[in-house]
């Protein structure tokens, strides 16, 4: 297939671009490099430094080739920031509508969209399946939900097949990617392990979990990329969770890291953060049923691959 990948110079996009090329697809990347890095884009792909908010530039890209599908990653992704800068995060919605409008204009029939576990909000039960209510608790999650809703209408009215993949916590490395501004727990553990950060703050160790610390569902970026390739084969629109159904606590992450790097992870337990659920895991039953997808890599693979990238920095 001839595929346009928005945000293909970013963390997940660059790994997906490589896997698409390895499987024989043609790829054009559009990315404004606000977060992405040009050198992460595989040299076999065409690259256009374009902002998806720039309708004229986007039109030029769509008119330059006959695309079969779009894989749409480009977005801002910091849930905390979305609660202090709503206009910035509204760009997630505007950019998605711009792409959908181009797809109508140039008759591109398929979109795979990066959605998020953030569409669900606080879990009413775990593991979360796709029937779980969607009640985002941050504006970032709301932008993803609104995009999904827009896509439903483009699907109904224009017949575009739109598959929303709702990712849980993405981890692991394939291309030496390091986000210097990452605010989640795994990069912080790696920074402590490699001496960049003094200690890890653990927000609460009195949750009703295996060891009192928060439990999350981590999915390897290579497994995630593979799910996009499978989703391109679907002929009807859908929303699908991507997780492993398995949770890992903060202490368990630290234990694995200590085993891998041979040092203890300096840490301090502080109070719970408001709004943090004890446990957040995803059912991947639907992904298995609809896509034939299941995760291959475990938490040790993810931490090991990231540790190598951090050590080579
Ligand atoms: N990383 C995660 O844990 C996670 C979890 C759930 C969902 N997601 C979603 O997955 C997608 C990819 O995430 P990522 O972790 O690879 O993030 P990333 O920041 O590494 O990649 C996003 C890419 O989009 C580009 N971009 C942003 N705005 C753009 C614009 N207006 N025009 C063109 N390019 C633009 C950036 O330069 C970057 O290369 C995002 O939509 C994100 O919301 C990520």
Image (tube, rainbow, N blue to C red):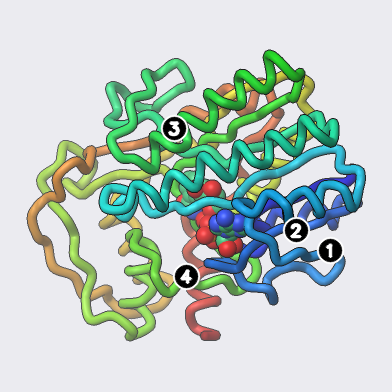
* Lower position in the chain sequence, tag 2 or tag 3: 2
The reply to whether the residue tagged 4 has its Cβ within 8 angstroms of ligand 1 is: yes
- Disc 2 and disc 3 in contact, CB within 8 angstroms: no
Residues at discs 4 and 3 in contact (Cβ within 8 Å): no
Question: For the residue labelled by badge 3, is the local secondary structure a helix, a strand or a loop?
Answer: loop
Q: Secondary structure at mark 4?
A: loop
Write the residue at 84% across / 63% down: 46
Say which mark, if any, is on residue 29.
Answer: 2
Question: Residue sitting at 50 percent across and 45 percent down?
Answer: 92
The residue at the point 32 percent across, 53 percent down is 85
Which quarter of the rendered picture does the N terminus lie within? top right
Is tag 1's residue or tag 3's residue first in the polypeptide sequence?
A: 1
User: How dense is the environment of label 4, judged by Cα within 10 Å: few (below 14), some, or many (20 and up)?
Assistant: few
Q: CA distance from mark 4 to mark 2?
A: 20 Å
Asked whether disc 4 touches disc 2, contact meaning CB atoms under 8 Å apart, the reply is no
Between marks 2 and 1, how big is the CA–CA gap? 6 Å
- Of 89 and 195, which appears nearest the observer? 89
Q: What whole-number distance in Å separates the C-alpha atoms at marks 4 and 3? A: 24 Å
Please identify, in this view, whether the residue under mark 4 or under mark 2 is nearer the observer: 2
Residue tagged 1: 46
| Mark sitting on residue 172 | none
- Per the image, label 1 sits on a secondary structure element best described as strand
> In the figure, residue 207 lies in which quadrant?
top left
User: Which of the two discs, 2 and 1, labels the residue nearer the N terminus?
Assistant: 2
**10 Å neighbourhood of mark 2: few (<14), some, or many (≥20)?**
many
The Cα atoms of the two marked residues, 1 and 3, are separated by 35 Å
Give x and y (percent) for residue 135.
33, 25
Q: Mark 3 or mark 4, which is nearer the start of the sequence?
A: 4
Marks 1,3: beta carbons within 8 A: no
Question: Residue 32 location, x and y as percent?
Answer: 62, 64
- Which circle marks residue 282 in the picture? 3
From the viewer's side, name the closer residue of 260 and 276: 276
């Amino acid at each position: 297939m001839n595929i346009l990948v928005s945000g293909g110079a970013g963390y997940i996009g660059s790994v997906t671009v490589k896997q698409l090329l390895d499987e024989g697809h043609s790829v054009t990347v559009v990315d404004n490099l606000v977060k992405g890095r040009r050198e992460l884009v595989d040299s076999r792909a065409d690259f256009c430094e374009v902002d998806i908010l720039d309708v004229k530039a986007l039109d030029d890209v769509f008119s330059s080739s006959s695309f079969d599908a779009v894989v749409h990653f480009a977005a801002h992704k910091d849930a905390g920031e979305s609660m202090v800068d709503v206009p910035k995060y509204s760009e997630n919605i505007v950019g998605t509508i711009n792409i959908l409008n181009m797809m109508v204009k140039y008759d591109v029939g398929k979109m795979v969209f990066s959605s998020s576990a953030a569409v669900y909000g606080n879990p009413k039960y775990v593991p979360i399946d796709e029937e779980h209510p969607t009640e985002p608790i941050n504006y970032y999650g709301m932008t993803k939900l609104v995009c999904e809703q827009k896509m439903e209408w483009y699907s109904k009215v224009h017949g575009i097949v739109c598959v929303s993949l709702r990712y849980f916590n993405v981890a692991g490395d394939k291309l030496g990617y390091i986000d210097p501004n990452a605010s989640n727990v795994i990069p912080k553990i790696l920074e402590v392990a490699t001496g960049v950060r003094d200690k890890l703050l653990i927000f609460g160790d009195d949750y009703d979990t295996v060891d009192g610390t928060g439990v999350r569902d981590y999915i390897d970026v290579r497994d995630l990329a593979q799910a996009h390739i499978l989703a391109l084969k679907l002929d009807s629109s859908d929303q699908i969770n991507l997780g492993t159904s398995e949770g890992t606590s903060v202490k368990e992450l630290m234990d694995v890291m200590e085993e891998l790097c041979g040092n203890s992870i300096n840490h301090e337990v502080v109070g719970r953060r408001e709004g943090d659920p004890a446990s957040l895991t995803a059912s991947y039953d639907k992904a298995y049923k609809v896509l034939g997808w299941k995760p291959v890599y475990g938490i040790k693979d993810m931490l090991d691959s990231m540790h190598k990238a951090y050590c080579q920095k």
